[in-house]
Image (tube, helix red, strand yellow):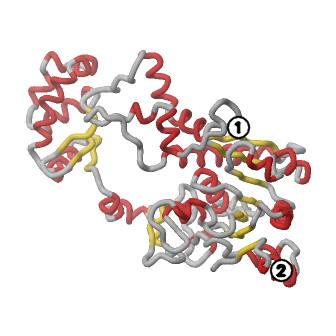
Amino acid sequence: MSYDAPLAGLKVVDLSQGIAGPYCAMLLAQHGAEVIKVESIGEGDWARALGVRYESHTAFSIIGNMGKRSISVDLKTEAGKQVLWRLLEGADIFLEGFRPGVIKRLGFDYEAVSAREPRILYVSISGFGQTGPLAERPAMDPVLQAYTGMMIENRGEDGIPHRVPVIVVDMSTALYAYQALSTALYARRDEPRGRYIDVSLMQAATALQSIRLMACHLEGGTMKPGGVPGGVFKTADGWMSIVAINDRDWASLCAAMDMPALAQEARFATPALRLANEAAVYAIVRPAIAAKPSAHWSARLTEARLMHERLNSYADFLDQPQVRETGLIHWLEQAGLPQKVPVPALPGLQPPMPGTLRAEAPVPGQHSAAILAEHGYTPAEIASLLDNGTVAAAR
């Protein structure tokens, strides 16, 4: 155990699929835990089929599974279930992401698993939670963005609600699950038993929107802006985000627009007045910003020490000097991909060294034989499990 690998020595069995559960388990692996990813035979984790596929991988499966080892098991067979029970021996953490009731039918619900491994931390990740009228409904990120109000609050200037495309619900669910596990691991030092941890996409999406949810409730509708001017502005050759809502910044923006007298106008003299006269503010600011290119405004606003930034594409972002200087992106090779891929650095961790387990996402069944051997299976038994289809190795 060290700051570089604080979870070294922990054993994790990851039965989750998609991105919420797998990304949580990936964080455990990146912090030093031994994570065994148990996948179905054939396609494996369904995240491997989301988006553009590169042999056995997609962007989802790479980001969700770096640092893990994979074994493919047919859990519909009794022999496959016995393999999973063997893997669970001595495990510290178990993650599953089936719809409520499915894991119990497989025979691996919390009561069954904790009876054999009483100190295990058992994490269930679901869409709507384990109970309630919607518990058994299939749910992914877009569904919870719609259900929890996120889409309605994310209206464009066209007035149409929009989905946030970066699967923010799945990713935040993974982060909340990881923090719940981290604190539970800390508490378990003085506890005789493990515990059951229930995490849902609905919980995470709601927690992520805590401030806006409360403000909308208190204000009886959509949350009022924190101040004006602030937001996205069209420039002569692109778009720019600008925030200048306090008096000092408003005066600086007026000066940058070569309109210093505007800051002294009575109708714009205070934040409250600017908010009350929002339409008039934007009627002046938007045309002024649109008249000049982004480079002009970047220079002016930087000099004025105003919060601003040009809207970058991902390609623009990856090419930024700040990104390169801080080592934000690791360029890593992955199985089946024709080129190195950008993998963001995780806060607080040393970068993964190319060619090491932390730097690679497994293909389905890549480590099946090795994992079985480590869990006491003889070469003959491994060969039999592979031959009868109970376990599969990487193709």
Instruction: Tell me residue 102's x, y (percent).
Output: 74, 48
Element marked by disc 2: helix
Please indicate whether residue 197 sits to the left or right of residue 43 in the image. right
Instruction: Tell me residue 239's x, y (percent).
Output: 22, 47
Task: Give the number of the disc on residue 384.
Answer: 2
Element marked by disc 1: loop
- The amino acid sitting under disc 2 is Ser
Residue at image position (65%, 30%) is 133
Q: Which of 307 and 381 is in front in this view?
A: 381
Query: How many residues crowd around disc 1 within 10 Å: few (fewer than 14), some, or many (20 or more)?
Result: some
Disc 2 versus disc 1: nearer the observer:
2
Please indicate whether residue 321 sits to the left or right of residue 34 in the image. left
Please indicate whether residue 22 sits to the left or right of residue 71 in the image. left
Q: Pointers 2 and 1 in contact (CB under 8 A)?
A: no
Residue 65 vertical placement versus 373 (above, below): above
Please indicate whether residue 112 sits to the left or right of residue 98 in the image. right
Residue 353 vertical placement versus 16 (above, below): below
Instruction: Tell me residue 280's x, y (percent).
Output: 15, 23
| Residue on which the image places disc 1 | 130
